[in-house]
Amino acid sequence: MRLALFQPDIPQNLGAAVRLAACLGVPLDVIGPCAFPLSDKKLRRAALDYGPEAVLALHDSWAAFLQAPERKAGRLLLFTTRGAQAHHACDYAPGDTLLFGRESAGVPEEVHAAADLTLIIPITAGTRSLNLVTAAAIALGEALRRTGGFPPLSP
């Protein structure tokens, strides 16, 4: 299981995603370009001291991400407001990559076209969207639960 962020806009969200990935033992792919320098102090503050625990792969572009060796295995599951299926009805597999778009613009059509499956997290009528990392945590939690992929309990 992998988590991937497409061209993140907000450093605090990327920092929180680094922390989420480190705590759940899931590699994180960051597909650039980001809207901020990766040395941003807001990113470091949000990630706290979890950076060394995270398995982080930085990709300069969408094309570089698609060519990366770790991208060869498993399906690409895009979480989008245009999803074809509810996230909780998906049959997840351990090799899946859960992909989330930019906070401001989602992903372009070429990314939609490359996805093996598009998923949506149902929210109540009249609300627009979840925070990026909140959505990632919901999706990753469900995917890990379904595949038995949560880390073992600490003694």
Image (cartoon, rainbow, N blue to C red):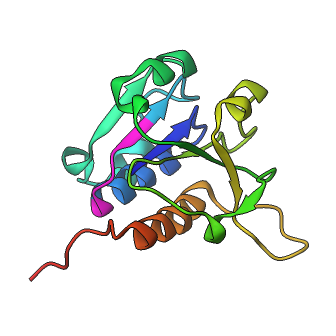
Q: Residue at the spot x=62%, y=71% of the render?
A: 88
Query: Left or right: 53 with respect to 71?
Result: left
Q: Is residue 39 visible?
A: no
Residue nearest the observer in this picture, 7 or 28: 28
Residue nearest the observer in this picture, 106 or 142: 142
Does 27 lie within the magenta span? yes
| Quadrant in which residue 44 is drawn | top left
Q: Quadrant of the C terminus?
A: bottom left
Q: Residue at the spot x=32%, y=62% of the render?
A: 24
Q: How many marks?
A: 0
Residue nearest the observer in this picture, 151 or 34: 151
Residue 102 in percent (x, y) is at 65, 39
Instruction: Please provide the residue range marked out in magenta.
Output: 23-29
Specify the farthest residue to the bottom: 155
Q: Is residue 98 visible?
A: yes
Q: Residue at the spot x=19%, y=45% of the render?
A: 52
Residue 86 in percent (x, y) is at 71, 65
| Quadrant in which residue 145 is drawn | bottom left
Query: Left or right: 61 with respect to 49?
Result: right
Q: Is residue 36 above or below residue 144?
A: above
Does 67 lie within the magenta span? no
Residue 35 in percent (x, y) is at 58, 29
Q: Is residue 93 above or below residue 155?
A: above
Residue 150 in percent (x, y) is at 31, 69
Q: Is residue 126 above or below residue 4?
A: below
